[in-house]
Image (cartoon, rainbow, N blue to C red):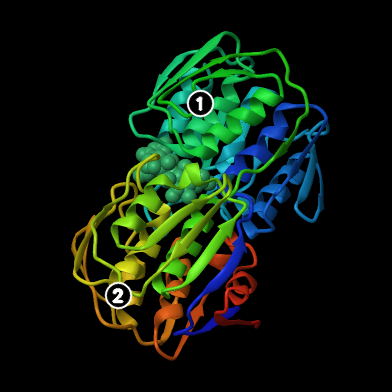
Amino acid sequence: MDRIIVEGGRRLSGEVRASGAKNAALPILVSSMLTDGPCVYDNVPALKDIESICLLLEDLGAKVETSGSKVQIDAKGIFKHEASYELVRKMRASVLVLGPLVARMGRARVSLPGGCAIGARPVDLHLKGLELLGAEIKIEHGYIDAIAPKLKGAVIYLDTVTVTGTENLMMAAVLAEGETILQNAAMEPEVVALADVLKGMGADIEGAGTPEIRIRGKASLSPVKASIIPDRIEVGTYMVAAALTGGDVTVTGCNPHHMMSVMDKLRQTGIKVDVVGDSAVRINGNGHIKSIDIKTVPYPGFPTDMQAQFMVLMSVADGRSVITETIFENRFIHVSELKRLGADITITSGSTAVVKGVPGLSGAPVMASDLRASASLILAGLVASGETEVNRVYHLDRGYEKIESKFEGLGAAIRRVRE
Ligand code: UD1
């Protein structure tokens, strides 16, 4: 298994370009299933998770062609309605095929995703929504079996804000008969990006980006061409890296409007953050970081996917920080690894960690446990003295495109050891 070795202590500077957002690309690639011809997307990041969803779409009968960051998906030939355990277990987001498969084929059999390192992550709200749209759902032998010869619009209240749940139901509702209203919908930019692509296919959707989305079903949709929005979590990760190393980094090709909560928090720590034009942000660290408190909440609040990276920043900040995770029940797995590097972190309850800033971290071998935890270990390695060896980096390859070369371009001493 590959490892990444980081030699800490280098100040980062220069420009780095954001890749397309994994979490926008996944539902958008899947939405091609709602049409009968070639959909073409650009700015698709080259990531393991993207490969996984393409394999799943091919397995269902779609034709997928990839050339650089361009992906063409022609779903005319979809003949299967089953997403196997073998494919779903590699990536939970595979459950996104459930809604569009039922809408298109009248039936879907999708392996029930298990829990994952960061929490139980049930899909009950995806299922409740589909039932309200008229699907008959059974769970048997580890599979979700959903049958609905024709979905019918409904009012669906989601008790918890769920990103992929909102996306799944939106994709089912665009081909349902009549009007669907999703209440307490997720407002993440990735939900809006999917809605924009669906609208490009001819769907009638209003309110994406607000808690109430109205969808009037159409009999059919047409193929579309679209570009994937920038990855706000990748952008945030490079911003924190710059802040941590007292660097001067400009992240280009991003959407600063999606970065408001992260920029606000960084400014509170005393870091200088400037929006440059409409697609870049410049971070100027002065080596002095003030401790602040953080609470993860759904968009537009502070993202859970940035919690681990901010925890590293707080580890070397001046003072004491309380970090509260409200989205996932087990998202502090990186704490024990950060402590191995010398961080002073105490988990005071399942959802709260207290971080007392220390003058410096010291490199050590560490183990990545999930995608964002892996990123936090690389960040810690950038400021730790000596060498940090991050093991199990396949988690990183799921979500960060060309991470070593991007950091290298900013002046980091980082290399991958392939095994
Ligand atoms: C998506 C993102 C992930 C991010 C998360 C929260 C993708 C592919 N992944 O994951 O990177 O960390 O949003 O911003 O876009 N829940 C239920 N029942 C459900 C669905 C969710 O109880 O049916 C709960 C979850 O356990 C969790 C919370 O709702 O506690 C939010 O999860 P959700 O927004 O669904 O996360 P994902 O869409 O899986």
Q: Is residue 101 visible?
A: no
**Is 335 drawn above or below residue 254 in the view shown?**
below
Q: Position of residue 317 (x, y in %)?
A: 27, 71
* Location of mark 2 (residue): 316
Q: Is residue 259 left or right of residue 76?
A: left
Q: Which mark is residue 241?
A: none
Q: Position of residue 200 (x, y in %)?
A: 70, 25
* Residue type, label 2: Val
Q: Residue at 53% x, 49% y: name it.
A: 92
Indicate the secondary structure of the residue bearing disc 2.
loop
Q: Nearer the viewer, residue 348 or 295?
A: 295
Q: Position of residue 7 (x, y in %)?
A: 50, 87
Label 1 neighbour load within 10 Å: few <14, some 14-19, many 20+: many
Q: Quadrant of ligand 1?
A: top left
The quarter of the image holding the C terminus is bottom right
Q: Residue furthest top?
A: 178
Q: Nearer the viewer, residue 37 or 273?
A: 273
Q: Nearer the viewer, residue 415 or 139?
A: 415
Q: Position of residue 246 (x, y in %)?
A: 41, 74
For label 1, being within 8 Å of ligand 1 is answered: no
* Residue type, label 1: Ala
Label 2 neighbour load within 10 Å: few <14, some 14-19, many 20+: many
Q: Nearer the viewer, residue 84 or 30?
A: 30
Q: Which mark is residue 208?
A: 1
